[in-house]
């Protein structure tokens, strides 16, 4: 998002040097004034203009540490060593160990 930072710095330089309004700068650049405002607010909150992953950094429905350990315990057991991640999810669910989607064991193994 280096481009956004360059644009913001350029706009500020032009405003100081020529005394033009922010609205004029955004109009010339065909940049929506609200978008510019969102960039500035994001920078004030996070110290960056964007480029991060959208949404929460940690999924609210993610696995708990205990659930992770239970999945790994099933995956490490000799009985299920040759099972795929989807099969492990089914076995863990059927045994009542933990209910997970088929791709969750894949992320842990």
Image (spheres, grey):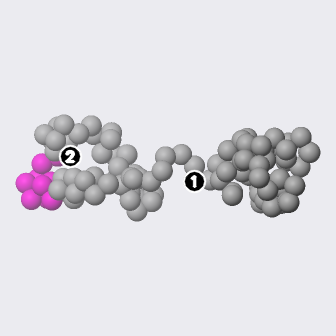
Left or right: 96, with 80 as reference point: right
Residue at 32% from the left image edge and 54% from the top image edge: 1
Residue 10 seen from this side: yes
The answer to whether residue 11 is magenta is no
Determine whether, in the image, residue 33 is placed left or right of residue 51.
left
Residue 66 lies in quadrant: bottom right
**From which residue to which does the magenta span run?**
13-22
Residue that mark 2 sits on = 22
Residue sitting at 87 percent across and 55 percent down? 79
SS for tag 2?
helix
Give the camera-side residue of 29 and 91: 91
Position of residue 12 relative to residue 59, above or below, is below
Q: Is residue 62 visible?
A: no
Question: Is most of the magenta stretch helix, strand or loop?
Answer: helix
Q: Which tag is nearer the camera, tag 2 or tag 1?
A: 1
Element carrying mark 1: loop
Mark-to-mark CA distance, 2 and 1? 33 Å
Q: Quadrant of residue 65?
A: bottom right
Kindly identify which residue carries mark 1.
57
């Amino acid at each position: 998002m280096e481009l956004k930072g360059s644009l913001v710095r350029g706009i500020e330089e032009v405003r100081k040097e020529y005394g033009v309004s922010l609205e004029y700068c955004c109009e010339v650049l065909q940049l929506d004034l609200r978008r510019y405002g969102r960039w500035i607010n994001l920078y004030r909150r996070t110290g960056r203009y964007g480029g991060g992953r959208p949404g929460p950094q940690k999924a609210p429905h993610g696995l708990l540490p205990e659930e992770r350990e239970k999945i790994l315990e099933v995956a490490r057991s000799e009985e299920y060593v040759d099972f795929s991640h989807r099969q492990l999810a089914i076995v863990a669910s059927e045994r009542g160990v933990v209910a997970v989607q088929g791709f969750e064991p894949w992320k842990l193994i």
